[in-house]
Image: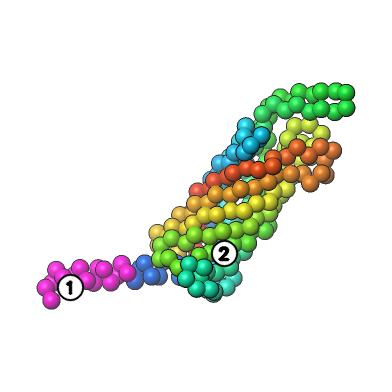
Amino acid sequence: MKPQLLLAFLLLSVCAAVAQDSIETVRSPHWNYGIWADYGNGLGTRSDVHIGGAGFRVGRVLTNEHGSNWMRGTFEYDIDLTPVEIYHFPKYTEYSGPYTILWPSRNYYTGGLNPFVAKWNFTKGQKWVPYIAAEGGVVFSDGNMPQGDTAETNFTSGAAFGAHRFVSDHGAWTFQGKVFHLSNASIGNHNPGVNIAMQFKIGYTWFKK
């Protein structure tokens, strides 16, 4: 075999080995840690609500691979912490009996915790690992949110979809979209909330034993 062909064969073999190993950390129990930035927007009648912030995640792949073909994957459980999130609500009209109150627009500075992130990783690929997740959490704001006689504590629930793009054996860029609902669960006298919102995240995730 010519030296050039031998070198090309060796390089292809190394690349193939790297590709095969690149997502092994999602195919068996491993810890992962991630950081992200996000942007979200209300939908429908709440399309003028805007959300932006940053946070981090700690999680663990709990199982080895199960299933076959495109459904093959692993189960993961995560916890998200969002120390910095700004919610912008436009001016809001509140009707209270015979009175009408016009609240001005306001930015809310919030922190949040998602203690429930149940995820399924699809592990058939070599570089890309798509996933779906169910999420639930709580948001604490610096005032009643939205404006009016509502509450400083709100709850979120939703479904996420995304993918890791592995760039090394233990690191991946992470892209995620999430559809969620925001509500104070009627712990305030009024519960206008946000029926449905869409949020996008981009971040980086590290995987380790």
Q: Is residue 115 above or below residue 46?
A: below
Report which quarter residue 191 is drawn in.
Answer: top right
Image mark for residue 186: none
Q: Are marks 1 and 2 in contact (CB under 8 Å)?
A: no
Q: Is residue 17 left or right of residue 99?
A: left
- Could you tell me if residue 143 is visible in this image? no
Residue behind mark 1: 6
Q: Badge 1: how crowded within 10 Å, few (<14), some, or many (20+)?
A: few
Q: Residue at x 58, y 68 (%)?
A: 75
Q: Is residue 29 above or below residue 95?
A: below
Q: Amino acid at mark 2?
A: Trp
Q: Which residues are magenta?
A: 1-16
Q: Is residue 92 left or right of residue 49?
A: right
What color scheme is it?
rainbow
Q: Residue at x 81, y 23 (%)?
A: 100
- Could you tell me if residue 39 is visible in this image? yes
Chief SS of the magenta region: helix
Q: Amino acid at mark 1?
A: Leu
Report which quarter residue 149 is drawn in.
Answer: top right
